[in-house]
Amino acid sequence: MGELQNVEIEQQQVHQKTWFKRHCPTFAAGAAAVAGSMAITQSANAALAATILEAVTGEITAIGNSQEAIYGLLVIVLIGFLIWRYSKRTVNSG
């Protein structure tokens, strides 16, 4: 057999990895590191959340107690004003 005529020989291209395939192992390692740190952070956040909720509950109780004191003071001032007004009316009419 002689040489082929009117035939182009094409070389097979060397396969090159895409950007994603080259960097995917790096992403997997980074994701594992982030997942591990998030697991540690969640346990720390649970303890912190309990502390914060305890503090907030104490503050709400304090606000409730101070509201009772404010309402009591408001009632005393209102009763004092009504007594003063009633006494002024009786003094002027007599």
Image (cartoon, rainbow, N blue to C red):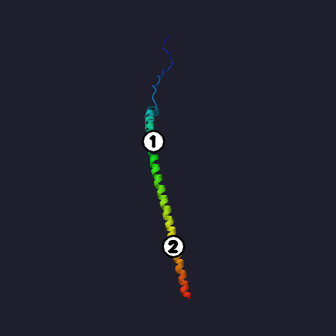
Q: Tell me which residue sits at (45%, 36%) in the image.
A: 32
User: Few, some or many C-alpha atoms within 10 Å of disc 2 (few <14, some 14-19, many ≥20)?
Assistant: few
User: Tag 1: Cα neighbours inside 10 Å, few (<14), some, or many (≥20)?
Assistant: few
Q: Secondary structure at mark 2?
A: helix
Residue 77 in the image: x percent, y percent?
50, 74
Report the mark closest to the observer, 1 or 2. 2
Q: How many marks?
A: 2
* Rendered location of residue 45, percent (x, y): 45, 46
**Which amino acid is tagged 1?**
Met
Front residue of 17 and 4:
17
Decide which of 32, 72 is in the foreground and name it. Answer: 72
Judged left or right of residue 26, residue 89 is right
Residue drawn at point x = 46 percent, y = 39 percent:
35
Question: What is the three-letter code of the residue carrying label 2?
Answer: Ile
Q: In the rendered view, would you say 12 is above or below 47?
A: above
Q: What residue do we see at 45% from left, 54% from top?
A: 55
Residue 38 image label: 1
Residue visible at 53% across and 79% down?
83
Q: Nearer the viewer, residue 48 or 8?
A: 48
| Marked residue nearer the N-terminal end (1 or 2) | 1
Helix, strand, or loop for circle 1? helix
Q: Is residue 26 above or below residue 14?
A: below
Q: Residue furthest bottom?
A: 94
Residue toward you, 63 or 10: 63
The label number, if any, that marks residue 76 in the structure image: 2
Apparent side of residue 92 relative to residue 27 in the rendered image (left or right): right
The answer to whether residue 56 is above or below residue 25 is below
> How far separated are the C-alphas under marks 1 and 2?
55 Å
Quadrant containing the C terminus is: bottom right
List x then y, in percent, for residue 52: 46, 52
